[in-house]
Amino acid sequence: MSNNNNVVLITGAAGWLGSLLARTILEDPKSPNLYLILADILKPEAPRGTRAITIKADLTDKTQVNTLFETDFGVPDTVYCLHGIMSRGSEDNFDLGLKVNVDAVRLVLDAARHQGASAGRLIRFIFASSLAVYGGPLPHVITPDTIASPEGAYGMGKLVSELLINEYTRRGFVDGRIMRLPTIVVRPGVPSAATSAFLSGIIREPLKGVETTCPIGNSLDSPELDLAAWLASPETTMKNFVIAKHIPSEKFRAHTRVVCLPGFTATVRDELWALEEVAGKEALRLVKFKDDPTNRRLVSSWPARFDNSYALSLGFVVDEGGMVPVVQRFKEKVQAGVA
């Protein structure tokens, strides 16, 4: 078994976020000679030319989780915990959401705790949380002191896991870093089960010449299109995940490892305007409307404005210029055949 101390485990590595992180972290100049352990319910694909072990694993099974820390690469120094059942999927199947979004996270946490102790190593545990932890009456701008009170099963599961990670960190079991992600746009690939998936779909599909449905409002004139969301691009999100690995522990607030990653505010209407500006009215005509009250309720419960100051003070970065540059970058990827 290797004694290498630059080993990164990514759970959920077969998903879009995990696979993108695996490719991005290989370009990190602060992580030379990187070894990757990539695990998911479906066997992930390793980036070409990398030192990687890919494992098909049921992360709700303790024995299978423990094997991720017992490969030939040795005990990882960093875990990116990215697996999960997305927001609409968690709402529709409550028990499965709990099993994957809470129980499986605790199994990975416990393995990091015990395997790290055996190796004499405090493992960095970087967790992908969500702004879905918020709900109820909220201030106009969310600050690090705003209380989280979710109004959906997905947000509840994320918040429970956050509390576990904070407690494991307080006790010195792991070195937790909890990243509350904005909604990421534009996601490539096919639509997901996330309630927020349409925020990418209304850009992605029209740029590919494909018709899509917006579940907010029933026409371009609907006032519901003024629904605002807190967004970040995939490129910026990946930069911030890599940055999270290198922040000194003492820089975090003493009582919590939660960080709301930087983002920007845009309405559904802003997105459609950006689509039209970048790709013209022909692309905009591919967006059809069919209001979905459940979808609208969940997305409306999430905050759309955050104070980025704390995250930026830690060294995280933010998108500049709003939606138009984000849409333009994705259009260029579509034209290059890489989206």
Image (cartoon, helix red, strand yellow):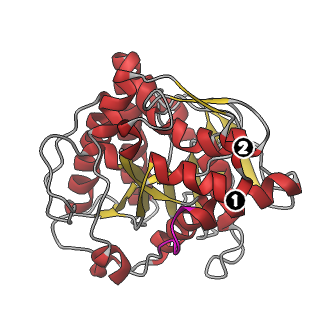
Callout 2 crowding tier (Cα within 10 Å): few <14, some 14–19, many ≥20: many
Q: Is residue 142 magenta?
A: no
Residue drawn at x 80%, y 52% as measured from the top left: 334
Q: Which element carries disc 2, helix, strand or loop?
A: helix
> What x and y, as percent, mark residue 18?
61, 49
Does the rendering let one see residue 2? Answer: no
Most prominent secondary structure in the magenta stretch? loop
What residue is disc 2 on? Answer: 283
CB within 8 Å, label 2 to label 1: yes
Amino acid at circle 1: Val
> What x and y, as percent, mark residue 71?
64, 48
Seen from the viewer's position, the closer of residues 179 and 190 is 190
Residue 15 to residue 27: above or below: above
Residue drawn at x 27%, y 64% as measured from the top left: 257
Q: Which element carries disc 1, helix, strand or loop?
A: helix
Residue 286 to residue 249: above or below: above
Seen from the viewer's position, the closer of residues 49 and 330 is 330
Residue drawn at x 53%, y 51% as measured from the top left: 271
> What x and y, as percent, mark residue 338?
82, 53
| Residues shaded magenta | 318-323
- Which of the labelled discs sits on residue 278, or is there none? 1
Does the rendering let one see residue 296? Answer: yes
Residue drawn at x 72%, y 74% as measured from the top left: 33
**Distance from the alpha carbon under mark 2 to that under mark 1:** 9 Å
Q: Which badge, 2 or 1, comes first in the chain's sequence?
A: 1
Residue 18 to residue 170: above or below: above
Res 166 → quadrant:
bottom left
Q: Is residue 171 left or right of residue 290?
A: left
